[in-house]
Image (cartoon, rainbow, N blue to C red):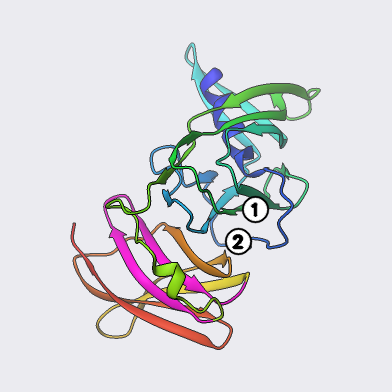
Amino acid sequence: MKKIFTLLFCLTTLGFASKLHAQCTPDLSWNTSGIRPDSTTNLPDGCENVPYSTQMDIYVPDSVHQIQMGQDVAIYIDSVRLLSVTGLPPGMSYVTNPANGKFPKFAHGCALISGTCSTPGTYPLQVITKASVRLLLPFLPATVRYDTVNYYRIVINTAGGANCNVGIENHLDPTEMGIHSVVANANDHYLQVTCNAPANLPSQFRVVNSIGQVIYQNTVTTQQGYQIIRLNDFNAENGIYVLQMQQGNQFKSYKLQVIK
């Protein structure tokens, strides 16, 4: 039973409060129950003194199931809500959509994680959550459960290290768009994009193959300036592709190679 409740509470990791004015856009086409990225993929790394931005998505099912003593036990979900979070890197914060951090069943939600941290290190996140659930039958009285989710973390790498570009943000016009590097991890199904965005607005990313077909697309809210973004659910065969980034009337492309 503990394992199932942990799954429920993972759905509320996106309920972090924030004072940011930017907002993420839920991916309504994603209907897999749960949260992405998951605990295996985790959150992307960041760099010291470099703006960080990434989006997480959730879809809340109405129930989950577990086999106990040969019986299929159903746990019906009314809603999940965040109560508190600790361990954030200094300078970073979160904003959720919906803004109150409460996610009822069948709800799509997202969180924009952003900010600039000047202290390198590994920052484990600890999230306290509350869920309203009904055991066995959907019409029984709701039960309140509290739990802690502690497998998410954000790593801030030192400027000048192998994982960080040094000084590039000092030479960029914050109103201009640019793609500076792309890491294509087809085995773990994500793209890590180092880019420059002109505004705190949604940016569309598309991957196009050699015959002009769009094989992947994702829209995330980017922050103005230099940042590192992880795009999840990327899958492609070995080959050469073009990543396209667009915000408003600004458009940039970047050639990338996929090797599995």
Type of the residue with mark 2: Leu
The residue positioned 28% from the left and 64% from the top of the image is 236
- Residue 160 visible somewhere in the drawing: yes
Above or below: residue 103 compared with residue 242: above
Task: Report the front residue among 256 and 176.
Answer: 176
Q: Which residue is mark 1?
A: 108
The residue positioned 39% from the left and 74% from the top of the image is 179
Q: Helix, strand, or loop for circle 1?
A: strand
12 in magenta: no
On the image, the x and y values in percent for residue 208 come to 34, 78
Could you tell me which quadrant the C terminus lies in?
Answer: bottom left
The reply to whether the C-beta atoms of the residues labelled 1 and 2 are less than 8 Å apart is yes
Above or below: residue 144 compared with residue 245: above
Q: Main secondary structure of the magenta part?
A: strand
**Mark 1 Cα-neighbour bin, 10 Å: few <14, some 14–19, many ≥20:** many
Task: Report the front residue among 147 and 126.
Answer: 126
Q: In which image quadrant can residue 5 be found?
A: top right
Q: How many marks?
A: 2
The residue positioned 48% from the left and 54% from the top of the image is 49
In the visual, does 141 lie left or right of 180? right
- Residue 136 visible somewhere in the drawing: no
Q: Which residues are magenta?
A: 176-199
Q: Which residue is mark 2?
A: 28
The residues tagged by marks 1 and 2 sit, at their Cα atoms, a distance apart of: 6 Å
Type of the residue with mark 1: His
Above or below: residue 20 compared with residue 198: above
